[in-house]
Image (spheres, rainbow, N blue to C red):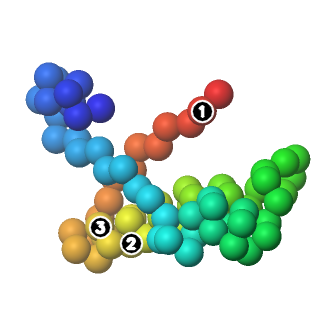
Amino acid sequence: MKSESQAQGLPFKAHLLQPDFKGTFWVGLIGKGYPARKGKFRWCTEQLKINPSNRFICDVIRNNGEAIVALGTNW
């Protein structure tokens, strides 16, 4: 994303987000005893993706007054 946005002269900046240590996959799986993801019980989505994204977006809005977010998905 970085190289393509620079090549096209777009003011985009990619950020790699990571959960807090207590929200990592291995802490949930081994430390808290959560089962590996399956079916409808997907605790890891909230811990690994949603919470870090929300925290980052709130920080950007707090510092800049607004945020534009582009999210990708896996198929």
**Helix, strand, or loop for circle 3?**
helix
Q: Residues within 10 Å of mark 2 (few under 14, many from 20)?
A: some
Q: CA distance from mark 3 to mark 2?
A: 6 Å
In the image, residue 68 above or below residue 58: above
Q: Amino acid at mark 2?
A: Cys
Closest to the camera, between mark 1 and mark 2, is: 1
- Specify the quadrant that holds the N terminus: top left
Direction right: furthest residue: 39
- Specify the quadrant that holds the C terminus: top right
Q: Position of residue 25 (x, y in %)?
A: 62, 59
Residue at 79% over, 53% down:
36
Q: Position of residue 42 (x, y in %)?
A: 77, 56
Q: Which of the labelled discs sits on residue 42, or is there none? A: none
Q: Position of residue 28 (x, y in %)?
A: 68, 67
**Helix, strand, or loop for circle 1?**
loop
Q: Earlier in the sequence, mark 3 or mark 1?
A: 3
Q: CA distance from mark 1 to mark 2?
A: 24 Å
Residue under label 3, please give it.
60
Q: Amino acid at mark 3?
A: Val
Q: Amino acid at mark 1?
A: Asn
Q: Which of the labelled discs sits on residue 58, or is there none? A: 2
41 vs 53, left or right, is right
